[in-house]
Amino acid sequence: MVKKDGFKTQFSNILIDEFQDTDPMQMELFEYLMKQAKSFTVVGDINQSIYGFRGSNINPFTYLAKYHKDKFEFKSLTTNYRSTHEIIDVSEDFIKHQRPVESALGKAQCGRDVK
């Protein structure tokens, strides 16, 4: 349990990266920070969650959408600017059957053609 008595943050804008690996204790801390922050942004990819063995939530994004829907805005980043078409195609063939049912994302688009 997070001890909240007298806890204050000096930061008004909070950014949490790798949010897909959030565990229940971290979620409790994040919720407390959300109450104090002017803006709160989380970034992550549910398809890359690797810490389920240590208690990370199944899908913390779904949790935020359900319990903080008045503050929650979901943005999908579906373009991959780092990888070639070949890497994206091979990766998709490997992971498509493992993609969580709740994932709204499909195959990434290659951003190398974007000018």
Image: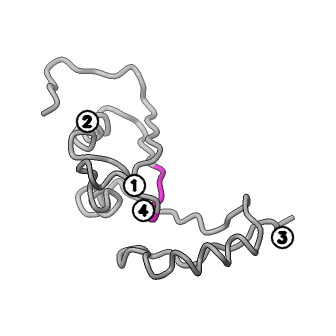
Residue 44 included in the magenta stretch of the image? yes
Amino acid type indicated by mark 4: Ile
Q: Which residues are magenta?
A: 43-47
Q: Quadrant of the N terminus?
A: top left
Marked residue nearer the N-terminal end (4 or 2):
2
Instruction: Kindly state the secondary structure of the residue where label 1 is placed.
Output: loop
Marks 4/2: CA–CA distance:
20 Å
Q: Are marks 4 and 1 in contact (CB under 8 Å)?
A: no
Q: Are marks 4 and 2 in contact (CB under 8 Å)?
A: no
The residue at which mark 2 appears reads as 29
* Number of numbered discs: 4
Marked residue nearer the N-terminal end (3 or 1):
1
> Percent from the top left, x then y, of residue 87?
71, 70
Residue at 58% x, 81% y is 93
Of tags 4 and 1, the one toward the viewer is: 1
**Disc on res. 50:** 1
The answer to whether residue 13 is left or right of residue 30 is right
Residue extending furthest toward the right: 115
Marks 4/3: CA–CA distance:
26 Å
Q: Quadrant of the C terminus?
A: bottom right
Which secondary structure class fits the magenta region best? Answer: loop
Q: Is residue 1 above or below residue 112?
A: above
Q: Is 52 in front, or is 110?
A: 52
Q: Is residue 33 above or below residue 66?
A: above
> Percent from the top left, x then y, of residue 50?
39, 55
